[in-house]
Image: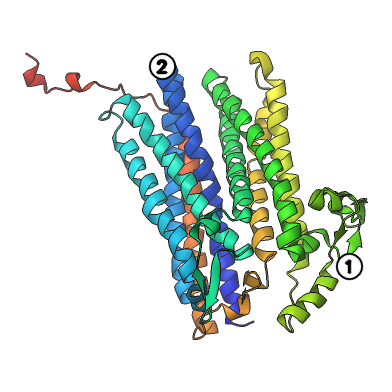
Amino acid sequence: MDALDLARWQFGVTTVYHFLFVPLTIGLGIFVAGLQTAWHRTGKEHYLKLTKFFGKLFLINFAMGVVTGIVQEFQFGMNWSEYSTFVGDVFGAPLAMEALLAFFMESTFLGLWIFGWDKLPKKVHLACIWAAAIGSNLSAYFILAANAWMKHPVGYEVVDGKARMTDLWAVLTNSTALAQVPHVIGAAFIVAGGFVLAVSGYWLLKTRAAMWRSAARAALVMTAIAGAVVAGTGDMSAKLMYEQQPMKLASAEGLERDTAGAAFSVAPGIEIPKVLSFLATNDFDATIQGTEDLQRRFEQQFGPGDYRPNQAIVFWSFRVMIVFGLATVGLSVLGLWLTRRKRGFPRWLSRAFLLALPLPLAAVIAGWLLSEIGRQPWTVAGELLTASSVSPGVTLAEVATSLTIFTLLYGVLAVAEAVLLTRHVRKGVEEPEPIIAKAERREPSLMY
């Protein structure tokens, strides 16, 4: 094992952990904004209670996401300086837009929302949570656009061994990004929906309060709609993968040789004839390139080397993503059917919501592994190998030390996150404080 291997492990561990918070923040922000909108429009008190309850869970998760995300920036400088040098001019614009526009917008309006409950007019306060939620989604867009460029680099030229941006619009509207952004954001809403269902299921087992039924029903609708978005954009991504990342597609299916009318592999030894060709091209008889034939072509194009990713991880990540994602969405559709026309939630369904909490999280992590490991051995497809991206002066001992520190730190943060969320969920909703109008906020001595 060398410094490159440990650097990859470190980035993988920290990024996977960070990615546990990102989708929940994206989806839960919109959900909380929706609850407050319902309170604003109907005046029903239980919507206010739910807004404050899930708002606190959202804030805990947001804070942890910010803390864990900062580490990523340090790693670019410490372990991946060659990568940073190559992509810096391209990544500078979208990442600056993410920090200065999206994150600034998100954090500013979130602060106004936290401290503005009894200080801002109701409509302005409502606009603050929507602005914060929209900011988190904009932040995701800019980051995913940069990530998509690594898989399908466009709008650039290489000058003196560095990528120079020539067209910002091409980077931001990269075909890979246009499919990846709604796919990831849709998955984020499934994660948030699964989280709300688990919390609601816990309380539905303890009490039959109507407000938890309202929260669960809203989460069921959100999860079902998001599932349709993920399915549609997943189909788009498969077709783009066929054109732009054929090695990833072949590895995800365990296809070794170029095959006309390629079968879709459900599991080793279980195949559905010609379905892979249709999913990738809308043609049942189309030829899908295999890993071994692609390896030979890449050697001719890029020189000696192994251009195949870890096939076992890519193969099984793809299936975990699909199976766990479908299970979560299927449970939401079943829940909508069973609770139609104001029917109550069966106790077994509430237990299922609670037990299914890990499924969407596992699905998004598997999807991330498929996306990033499937791109290997490239950090920037066709331009920069991962082996050429690591910092030249970093030693094995240095990376091992930072990996140990970050792993222990993240372990502590994981415990803190679990304790804070669990404690707040078990505490339940609090009685909302009255929203006092400005005219009524006077000192007692001035009232007579």
Q: Measured from the top left, where is residue 252 in percent x and y?
A: 78, 59
- Which numbered disc flags the more N-terminal residue, 2 or 1? 2
Q: For the N terminus, which image quadrant?
A: bottom right
The answer to whether residue 44 shows anywhere in this view is no
Which amino acid, by three-letter code, is at mark 2?
Answer: Gly
Q: Residues within 10 Å of mark 1 (few under 14, many from 20)?
A: some
Q: Residue at x 63, y 41 (%)?
A: 357
Quadrant hosting residue 311: bottom right
Find residue 43 and name its label: 2
- Furthest residue in direction front, as rendered: 166
Q: Measured from the top left, where is residue 266 in percent x and y?
A: 85, 51
Residue for badge 1: 257
In what element is the residue under mark 2?
Answer: loop
* Relative to 361, residue 424 above or below: above
Q: CA distance from mark 2 to mark 1?
A: 63 Å
Q: Residue at x 80, y 75 (%)?
A: 297
* Relative to 275, residue 383 above or below: below
Q: For the C terminus, which image quadrant?
A: top left
* Relative to 251, residue 356 above or below: above
* Relative to 120, residue 360 above or below: below
In what element is the residue under mark 1?
Answer: loop
Q: Residues within 10 Å of mark 2 (few under 14, many from 20)?
A: few
Q: Nearer the viewer, residue 137 or 445?
A: 137
Quadrant hosting residue 379: bottom right
Q: Nearer the viewer, residue 93 or 35?
A: 93
Find residue 16 and name its label: none
